[in-house]
Image (cartoon, helix red, strand yellow):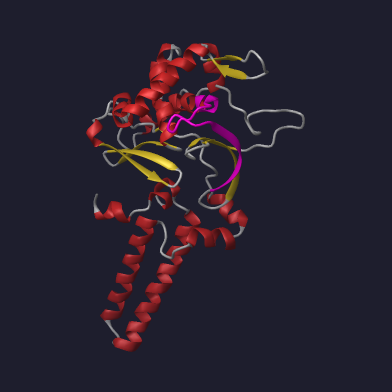
Amino acid sequence: MSIVERVRQPEYTGENRCIPCTLANGVIAVVLAAVVGAAWWTLVAPGVGAAVAASVVLVASALSIWLRGYLVPGTPELTKRYFPDWVLAKFDKGPATAGGMAAGAGAGAEAPGDEAGADRELQGQVNPEAVLLEAGVVEPCADEDDLCLAPEFRGAWRERMAVIRDEGAERDELAAQLDLDPEEVRFEEHGGAFVAFYDGRRAGQWESRAALIADLAAARVLPEWVAEWDDLAIGARSQLLGGLRIFIEECPDCGGPVVAGRETVESCCRSHEVVAANCQECGSRLLELPYEEPAEGAGGPGGDPAPSD
């Protein structure tokens, strides 16, 4: 692992970067550089040396902000506490929805900036419930007004999850499904995220190893049920895979029961109410969706779900 990778904090950089934090720290860096330059000019000697000292401080501060997301420790908490809510709302991404394999992560992916490739990945957005119901993956429950997994699919999915978990085959499975070299695939855990990287690019992100196992196993079983699977973009496939996780009752990782309910989570800028499904024994998160108040007298996915498997 390189020095940059050891210093870098992905939970505060890249897509997780807190823009208000970056702006605040940028201002602090400029002020700090000016103070150092002025102090050098006054206490050491006027001239070029002061400008060099200020430049060194500014560059070092910029590197810290770029690699770590902030210059002053605790900045994310400070911005949440002292920045006006309307400012934070402009930059906030909200709680993360179900992740999955990243669009364009395969071996034949287009280079960054290929607008045509990006447009193709955006096409084919699907309604997971409608597709899974039509394919027979889910069906009306026998004893309640809800949807349940078809017994045959449930058995095949569970069996495949057990194989991947017991053999530790996540890397090989992901590489095979995205047509990548398994030796170049690596996983990192950052807070609540389980992230896959390939050749310096993000190949996918999941809430946990349990969610990854569930998706990899489902991606092996679904092609036998969903006729158009091979024609779906990676983003659409991830929608279907994420939608299936709400039906899991037994954790794909530790084997314990799965419990669901409302929680408060922290995004880069604010706090949010979400509906989350977690493995009771090991705490692995399987699913996290924004909470929406249901209409009076109506149920729905926005409330506290009771997944059935």
The foreground one among 136 and 156 is: 156
Residue 73 quadrant = bottom left
Where does the image place residue 92, in percent across and percent down from the top left?
54, 48
In the image, is residue 280 above or below residue 222?
Answer: below
In the image, is residue 123 above or below residue 204?
Answer: above
Where does the image place residue 143, in percent across and percent down from the top left?
66, 15
Residue 128 falls left or right of residue 71: right
Q: Is residue 151 magenta?
A: no
In the image, is residue 269 above or below residue 283?
Answer: below
The foreground one among 52 and 165 is: 165
In the image, is residue 172 above or below residue 230?
Answer: below
Seen as rendered, the residue at the extreme right is 297
The foreground one among 279 and 228 is: 279
Could you tell me if residue 85 is visible in this image?
Answer: yes
Could you tell me if residue 127 is visible in this image?
Answer: no
Residue 273 falls left or right of residue 229: right
Tally of numbered discs: 0
Magenta part of the protein: which range?
244-266
The foreground one among 33 and 169 is: 169
Identify which residue is drawn at 40% across, 24% down: 161
Where does the image place residue 244, in percent across and percent down from the top left?
51, 24
Where does the image place residue 150, in percent across and percent down from the top left?
53, 13
Identify which residue is drawn at 30% across, 80% down: 50
Residue 250 falls left or right of residue 168: right
Q: Quadrant of the C terminus?
A: top right
Residue 114 quadrant = top left
